[in-house]
Image (cartoon, rainbow, N blue to C red):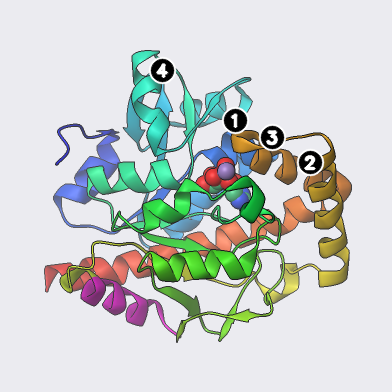
């Protein structure tokens, strides 16, 4: 049992106290996932989308050693522009607190802090997973093990093919994490609506997903859920274009010996450069799309919890 909770913004505290709909948002996407100023514009835009869909946004981060859920405008600005900010997964939080560091929280750290705060639903772009070549490197994101032990529902657009998608899905199966695709049979690949793999389950409404969450938790499974929401049709990239770009970025990372926690940020930045900003545009569109679905799920889930 945890004795620490993140410090809540007044708005988030109010929503929690009244059983309102809340959506947690991560901050590594701001600090390590997108360049400035697109990162700030996206963070603000995503919060606005959550509000438009009836929920309160709670962006999670570590600010000067303090765990936080719900940031002020100037704090988002500071995160978006800060240099040398820590990328914190769950295991890095305690040291960041001791050192008074400012950190972007990954999916794993954000899930953990959302759960401590009492927030059930979290929207992001892509989750980490099993990297290509993991049979050699053992590089498997802590996001996957966190999904296997923390009850947060994570809405994403699938995973990028910087990862081994088949192994990522296998790993989630092992971890007792349901993978639910929204409105499709296909497991999406972030920039594209299809990955070549099907999701385990399909549900077609935010209300049904909220019901599945509720039952999943009532069963005492103790695990999270991964909701895969395909990128909007008009924003999707063509597989040939993006797969080539991703392959180039992965090869470059290998040649330069980049690994461990630097690998994902390197790949994201290189893909953005190599695609001349096309990947960034798609990324922004899909994050907003995920925030909208997560907010609608949060509204439905709040009603189920009250009933
Ligand atoms: N994948 C993306 N965008 C991201 C990330 C992953 O498409 O911004 C970030 C998320 O914060 C995720 C983290 O939790 O990278 C995973 O890092 P790693 O692969 O080092 O576990
Ligand atoms: Mn890793």
35 shown above or below 281: above
Q: Position of residue 36 (x, y in %)?
A: 69, 33
* 161 relative position to 155: left or right: right
Q: Is residue 230 magenta?
A: no
Check disc 2: other Cα within 10 Å, few if <14, some if 14-19, many if 20+: some
Q: Is residue 64 above or below residue 2?
A: above
Residue under circle 4?
64
At horizontal 14% and vertical 33% (from top left) the residue drawn is 3
Cα distance, mark 1 to mark 2? 25 Å
Query: Which residue is labeled 3 in the image?
Result: 37
- Tag 1 near tag 3, CB within 8 Å: yes
**Of circles 2 and 4, which is in front?**
2
Q: Earlier in the sequence, mark 2 or mark 4?
A: 4
* Mark earlier in primary sequence (1, 2): 1
Is residue 249 left or right of 261 when viewed as pictured?
right
Q: CA distance from mark 3 to mark 2?
A: 25 Å
- Secondary structure of residue under mark 2: helix
Q: Is residue 220 above or below residue 196?
A: above
Q: Main secondary structure of the magenta part?
A: helix
Mark number for residue 80? 1
> Is residue 92 toward the left or the right of residue 194 in the image?
left
In this rendering, the label closer to the viewer, 4 or 3: 4
């Amino acid at each position: 049992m945890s004795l620490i909770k993140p410090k809540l913004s007044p708005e988030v505290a109010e929503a929690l106290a009244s059983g309102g709909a809340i959506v947690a948002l991560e901050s590594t996407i701001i600090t390590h996932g997108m360049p400035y100023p697109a990162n700030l514009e996206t963070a603000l835009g995503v919060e606005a989308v959550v509000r438009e869909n009836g929920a309160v946004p709670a962006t999670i981060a570590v600010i000067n050693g303090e765990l936080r859920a719900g940031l002020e405008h100037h704090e988002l600005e500071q995160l978006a522009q800060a240099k040398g900010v820590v990328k914190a997964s769950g295991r890095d939080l305690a040291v960041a607190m001791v050192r008074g560091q400012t950190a972007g929280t990954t999916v794993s750290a954000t899930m953990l802090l959302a759960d401590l705060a009492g927030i059930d639903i979290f929207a992001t772009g892509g989750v980490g997973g099993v990297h290509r070549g993991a049979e050699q490197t053992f590089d498997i994101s802590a996001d996957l093990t966190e999904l296997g032990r923390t009850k947060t529902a994570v809405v994403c657009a699938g995973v990028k093919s910087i990862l081994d998608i088949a192994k990522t899905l296998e790993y989630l199966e092992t971890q007792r994490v349901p993978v639910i695709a929204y409105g499709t049979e296909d497991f999406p690949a972030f920039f594209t609506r299809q990955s070549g793999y099907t999701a385990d389950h399909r549900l077609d409404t935010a209300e049904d997903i909220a019901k599945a969450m509720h039952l999943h938790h009532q069963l005492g499974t103790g695990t999270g859920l991964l909701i895969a929401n395909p990128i909007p049709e008009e924003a999707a990239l063509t597989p040939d274009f993006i797969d080539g770009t991703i392959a180039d970025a992965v090869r470059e990372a290998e040649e330069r010996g980049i690994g461990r926690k630097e690998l994902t940020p390197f790949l994201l930045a290189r893909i953005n450069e190599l695609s001349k900003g096309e990947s960034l545009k798609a990324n922004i569109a899909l994050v907003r799309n995920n925030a909208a679905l997560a907010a609608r799920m949060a509204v439905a889930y709040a009603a189920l919890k009250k009933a």
